[in-house]
Image (tube, grey):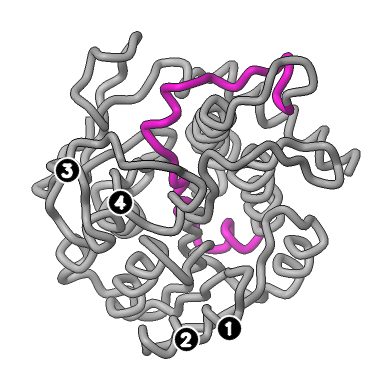
Amino acid sequence: MIKTEFGFGSTAAEVVEGVDLTGKRVIVTGASSGIGVETARALAHAGAEVTLAVRDTEAGEKTAKDIGGTTKVARLDLTDLASVDTFTQAWQGPLHVLVNNAGVMATPKQHTAQGWEWQFATNHLGHFALTTGLHDALAKEGARIVSVTSTGHMISPVVFDDVHYVFRPYDPWSAYGQSKTANVLFAVEATRRWAKDGITANAVMPGAIFTNLQRHLEGESTVDPALIKTTEQGAATSVLIATSPLLDGIGGRYFNDCNEAQTVDRRGEAPPMQGVARYALDPEAAERLWTYSETLLAKA
């Protein structure tokens, strides 16, 4: 178990203090708002060349100007495979850190042109296509991949028999849950397949933060106010996993509050916002998801 000196209240700037990322190249998806901005800011201020991969390049340019340093902007729409392909084909040279941060939550029922459920397509398949498309760049330097997930993964495993809600009634929260489980399983299998290339991937739960992610929600938050983080605190775990020497060669794990989480077999075994469901770390499910994802992309 990886344990650090940092915790719930730590900020991205604090966890990267003293780390020199000069010469390192980083991509952060969804980096024009929320914790993506603060993740990119901390990495850039540590000396990295950071590319903000965003749908709205105008917002991205404003963010890049605010962050300063060597911060670039490139368009990326994770639900558009042509956009993902354009992005990966345009990337030149090595890539040291990829933070798969972008995501949607509890969206109304919607499917992509391929018939893929929107949250699964955005949160998992788009990032799967992006990461596999960047494999050679990641392998040049033995890169780290940060897969941003959620405690929402405990709502649902990946339901392989009906991922896209063709038969079962659509539920925005179970759809969100299985997409977040997919984020964890991806980290497990990416590490297994790519460790020989020096690539590792870990999943991170940033915490409860009020951002644009909640735009589809109605009513008051049911989260204990004591558990709400600032965006700077929410970005801390991603930045720690991207940069800490403690994670050298370590992959396929799940972290929250800047520490590795305990594995649980039922909801309630860990405190709120803590723990990782055993099914999300299951190597057989991870391999099955990878194969399934490759098959979907091949048919697209």
Residue under label 2: 62
Q: Residue at x 28, y 25 (%)?
A: 275
Q: Nearer the viewer, mark 1 or mark 3?
A: 3
The one nearer the camera, 169 or 258, is 169
Q: Earlier in the sequence, mark 4 or mark 3?
A: 4
Q: Position of residue 257 (x, y in %)?
A: 21, 43
Residue under label 1: 58
Per the rendering, the mark at residue 225 is 3
Distance between the Cα atoms at labels 2 and 4? 22 Å
Q: Residue at x 42, y 31 (%)?
A: 152
Answer above or below: position of 190 versus 164. below
Distance between the Cα atoms at labels 1 and 2? 7 Å
How many neighbours does mark 4 have within 10 angstroms: few (below 14), some (14-19), or many (20 or more)? Answer: many
Distance between the Cα atoms at labels 1 and 3? 33 Å
Q: Is residue 68 magenta?
A: no
Residue under label 4: 209
The one nearer the camera, 20 or 87, is 87
Task: Tell me which segment is drawn in magenta.
Answer: 135-164
How many neighbours does mark 2 have within 10 angstroms: few (below 14), some (14-19), or many (20 or more)? Answer: few
Mark 4 belongs to which amino acid?
Answer: Ile
Q: Residue furthest left?
A: 5
